[in-house]
Image (tube, rainbow, N blue to C red):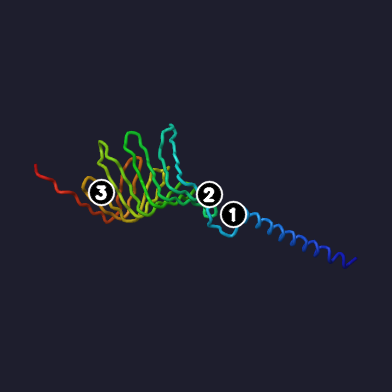
Amino acid sequence: MLRLAFWLPFTLLLLIAGLSFWLDQQVAQEDSVFGLGKNKTSADFILEGYSVVKLDETGHVQYRMNGQTLSHFRDLSQTQLQNVHWVHYQPGAPALTITSNQGTVLDNGKQIDLAERVIVHREADANQRNMQLTTAQLSLWPDSNLAKTNAPVRIESHGSITTATGMELNSKTRVLQLHKAVKATFPAKTKS
């Protein structure tokens, strides 16, 4: 009887350990069947020819983002974008367009990091001339109407060229702040 009292808890412990091992193996097999196994960097879904539209509280389009490919990575908590085309709409102002070859959506869509040939284009209106800004990297916060970079930027507008390192753009107010090393070249005025 003493031996049974000694071996019974030990046997139960071995049984529980064996069941735990078996259950772990079953879950691992299911993960590999559904593509959730060893390769944690595989996309869990891919959209080709995607388009996203954000409406404001009045039902007007606030911004539209589309592109060639959207690849979501659940395990990395991010989404990779290819050939991004983002347009911000502001009542009474021309559209502000931002394009890039690559993008990464972070923080559940609150931040979008754009890279590789980033171009910001603003059409002319009654108050401002058209403008094109190019940079290597730009971070967007669409809901805050902000775009920022610490990278060098080049701005071309009506014959003038401005270069700087770093900038911040408010897409709602259209105010552009250049951070440092600002240099500008303006075309010579012709005499009348």
Q: Position of residue 26 (x, y in %)?
A: 69, 56
Q: Quadrant of residue 96?
A: top left
Considering the image in quadrants, where does the C terminus appear? top left
Q: Residue at x 83, y 63 (%)?
A: 8
- Residue projecting furthest to the top: 58
Q: On screen, 15 above or below 78?
A: below
* 48 over 92 or under it: above or below: below
Callout 2: 10 Å neighbours few (<14), some, many (20+)? Answer: few
Judge left or right: residue 97 versus residue 38: left
Q: Are marks 2 and 1 in contact (CB under 8 Å)?
A: no
Residue type for callout 2: Phe
| x, y percent for residue 73 | 52, 52
- Disc assigned to residue 45: 2
Mark 1 and mark 3 lie on one chain; the one further toward the N terminus is 1
Can you say whether 5 is above or below 123 in the image? below
Left or right: residue 88 versus residue 42 is left
- Mark 3 highlights which residue? 156
Name the residue that disc number 1 marks: 35
Q: Name the secondary structure under disc 1.
A: loop
Judging depth in this view, the residue of 19 and 144 nearest the camera is 19
Q: Amino acid at mark 3?
A: Glu
| In this picture, residue 84 sits left or right of residue 132 | right
Asked whether the residues under the numbered discs 3 and 2 touch, taking CB atoms below 8 Å apart as contact, a structural biologist would say: no
Q: Report, in whole angstroms, how far the alpha carbon at label 2 lies from the one at label 1.
A: 11 Å
Q: What quarter of the picture does the N terminus occupy?
A: bottom right
